[in-house]
Image (cartoon, rainbow, N blue to C red):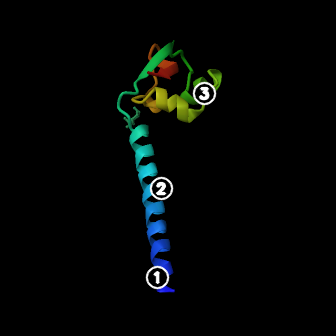
Amino acid sequence: MAKATIPIAIFLLAFFLLIFSISVKGEVVAAEPSLELQCNKAYGVKSGDTCFALAHTFKLSTDHFNFINPNLNCSALFVGQWLCVNAFLT
Ligand SMILES: *[C@@H]1O[C@H](CO)[C@@H](O)[C@H](O)[C@H]1NC(C)=O
């Protein structure tokens, strides 16, 4: 009885190590520093514009809008400020 459980335990251990190494690799790929955000289209802020309204106008989710404008403070938008409204990763 005990002899049979040891190979099963080894199999389970190997299985979990495999899953663990796959998930660790996935994180490394996601954090790849060679991916760079390049702005494809800029927009000059006009009077009355808000981040929310602009994201809607350019059919972007607020998450994506914030992602392509990483240093933007939406509480301090000013007329003439350039925003990215279309970007791609290189
Ligand atoms: C964004 O701008 C507002 C208004 O000027 C300011 O109060 C706030 O501290 C700013 N936030 C950041 C994160 O800079």
Could you tell me which secondary element the residue under label 2 belongs to?
A: helix
User: Mark 1 or mark 3: which is in front?
Assistant: 1
| N-terminal-most mark, 1 or 3 | 1
Could you tell me which secondary element the residue under label 1 belongs to?
A: helix
Query: What quarter of the picture does the C terminus occupy?
Result: top left
Q: CA distance from mark 2 to mark 3?
A: 35 Å
Name the mark on residue 19.
Answer: 2
| N-terminal-most mark, 1 or 2 | 1
Do the residues under discs 2 and 3 have CB atoms within 8 angstroms? no
Q: CA distance from mark 1 to mark 3?
A: 60 Å
| N-terminal-most mark, 2 or 3 | 2
Horizontal side of 65 relative to 81 (left or right) equals: right
Image height of 52 relative to 39, above or below: below
Residue depicted at 39% across the width and 29% down the height: 71
Q: CA distance from mark 1 to mark 2?
A: 26 Å
* 57, 22: nearer the viewer: 22
Residue depicted at 57% across the width and 21% down the height: 48
Residue 36: percent from the left, percent from the top?
40, 24
Mark 1 Cα shell of 10 Å, populated few (<14), some (14-19), many (≥20): few
Among the 4 quarters of the image, the one containing residue 28:
top left
User: Mark 1 or mark 2: which is in front?
Assistant: 1
* 33, 11: nearer the viewer: 11
Residue 88: percent from the left, percent from the top?
50, 21
The amino acid marked with disc number 1 is: Lys
The amino acid marked with disc number 2 is: Ile
Residue 33: percent from the left, percent from the top?
35, 32
Name the mark on residue 3.
Answer: 1
Do the residues under discs 1 and 2 have CB atoms within 8 angstroms? no
* 8, 50: nearer the viewer: 8
Looking at the image, in which quadrant does ligand 1 appear? top left
Name the mark on residue 56.
Answer: none
Name the mark on residue 60.
Answer: 3
